[in-house]
Amino acid sequence: MLTTRRQALKTLTAAAIASTALGKIPAFAQAPAAAPAAAAKAPTGPFTLPPLPYAYDALEPHIDTETMHLHHDKHHGGYVNKLNEALAKEPTFVVAPGSNVDELLKNLAAVPESIRTAVRNQGGGHSNHSLFWQTLAAKGSAPTGAFAKALEAELGGLEKFKETAAKAGAGVFGSGWVWLVLDGSKKLVVLTQPNQDSPLLEGHYPLFGIDVWEHAYYLKYHNLRADYITALWNIVNWDFISQRYDAAMKA
């Protein structure tokens, strides 16, 4: 009997259950080819899966508990593991434990070509999801301060932004993200990115992203992506986004 997509996702979920504003960036660099064995990094690699800032069931009923286990533990965790695996293939390219993955992506040209695509994909997945969890909260809020004023002046206000983002999300073919970013001129822009491509790759600073990969919503919303996006507005942590905007504008 053929397994449906929903059954497959539930199987992965069962296995999962069983089994920022700006910060200080540790350096990474090209190390000498003959580095001593004692200097080798731990087998787990420099990056770790951050815990959710709330309980798995905190976003119910808008995002279900099963999806949160699957999305965080299996998918985000998978990006972290594969990023570490890729970096382990180039031991002379040293990334310090605790490094900020955003800096790695912003300096992608410095990454050895043999692992550059893997770092772009897996590092993008790690970066995107690390921000995504922080921009959600059990109780939604409203934009405040300078960010609220900029949202009104540059994008027509919150309701207009929601319309623009929902339309953009519906138009993403396959998998990807809808982003609210600051561009190089520090103006608010809505854009879409395919797969796990980070806005950082194009010189943008991400403030808020909507994950429209099916693993983000399929267990609860099936093929109804628009319903998922509508529900998401109930749990957006605009306080965090407003603070992230303020920090970026001062940088």
Image (cartoon, rainbow, N blue to C red):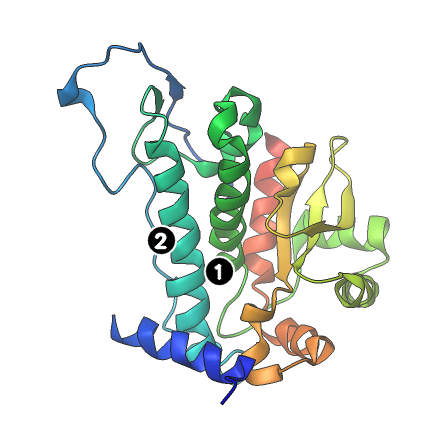
Number of labels in the image equals 2
Q: Residue 153 — which label? A: none
What crowding class fits label 1: few (fewer than 14 Cα within 10 Å), some (14-19), or many (20 or more)?
Answer: some
Indicate the position of residue 129 as horizontal and vertical percent values.
Answer: 50, 55
Indicate the position of residue 200 as horizontal and vertical percent values.
Answer: 62, 37
- Residue 223 in which image quadrant: bottom right
Relative placement, left or right, of 191 versus 100 is right
The residue positioned farthest toward the left in the image shown: 38
Q: Which element is circle 1 on?
A: helix
Residue at image location 56% in from the left, 63% down from the top: 237
Q: Identify whether 134 is placed above or below 13.
A: above
Indicate the position of residue 32 as horizontal and vertical percent values.
Answer: 31, 9
What crowding class fits label 2: few (fewer than 14 Cα within 10 Å), some (14-19), or many (20 or more)?
Answer: some
Residue at image location 20% in from the left, 35% down from the top: 42
Q: Residue 133 — which label? A: 1
Residue at image location 25% in from the left, 43% down from the top: 44
Q: Which element is circle 2 on?
A: loop
Q: Identify whether 46 is placed above or below 137.
A: above
Q: Amino acid at mark 2?
A: Pro
Residue in the foreground of this view, choosing between 128 and 59: 128
Q: Earlier in the sequence, mark 1 or mark 2?
A: 2
Residue at image location 59% in from the left, 67% down from the top: 236
Marks 1 and 2 in Cβ contact (< 8 Å): yes
Q: Quadrant of the C terminus?
A: top right
Indicate the position of residue 33 as horizontal and vertical percent values.
Answer: 30, 11
Q: Identify whether 193 is placed above or below 138.
A: above
Q: Residue 50 — which label? A: 2
Q: Amino acid at mark 1?
A: Trp
Q: Identify whether 102 is placed above or below 69.
A: above
Report the Cα–Cα distance between label 1 and label 2.
10 Å
